[in-house]
Image (cartoon, rainbow, N blue to C red):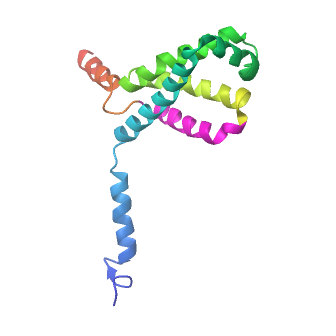
Amino acid sequence: MTALTEREGGSFAPIALLRMIIALFERIPYGLLAIVARVALAQVFWSSAQTHLANWDTTLALFSDQYQVPLLPPDFAADLAVTMEVLTPPLLLLGLATRFAALGLFGMTMVIEIFVYPQAWPTHIQWAAMELMLVARGAGLISLDTLIGARARRWS
């Protein structure tokens, strides 16, 4: 009999191997996934902030002519967007107020998707997946959120 047909503990060897591989995948710590998501999102939005800040006149023109967020004056929309792009990446990298930073970016992503670049949904859905994961599960073990939470539990 070959390895493909031998039975081990009631399962075919390939099935046992697949179960072992899946068990290894399930041991990937959430904190590792969270760090990757935090860094990826921080890079995306920080890069956008740097582009917008490089030439404020161009940024205002973009918000007036191309982005056209409804209900908000272009200069206010630009101020709000760039403020989010500057403030949230450091919070994500530090893992500080992560759920709130990710929730804010999720809202911004939805505005971009719905009103500005609906054709860019393949990119936006990736951002949204990372943002929602962070909103739902938090920053992970290696974060200021975890450190502050541990200290708060000790004090209470």
In this rendering, the count of numbered labels is: 0
Main SS type for the magenta part? helix
Please give left or right for residue 26 compared with residue 101 in the image: left
For the C terminus, give its image quadrant: top left
> Which residues lie in the magenta part?
119-138
| Residue at the far bottom in the pictured view | 1
The image quadrant of residue 35 is: top left
Give yes or no for residue 105 being in the magenta stretch. no
Please give left or right for residue 15 compared with residue 105 in the image: left
Q: Position of residue 26 (x, y in %)?
A: 37, 52
The image quadrant of residue 115 is: top right
| Residue at the far left in the pictured view | 154
> Viewer-proximal residue, 111 or 79?
79
Q: Position of residue 108 (x, y in %)?
A: 61, 24
Q: Residue at x 63, y 42 (%)?
A: 122
Q: Residue at x 66, y 27 (%)?
A: 112
> Viewer-proximal residue, 156 or 13?
13
Q: Position of residue 111 (x, y in %)?
A: 67, 25
Q: Position of residue 77 (x, y in %)?
A: 66, 13
The image quadrant of residue 128 is: top right
Q: Residue at x 31, y 76 (%)?
A: 9
For the N terminus, give its image quadrant: bottom left
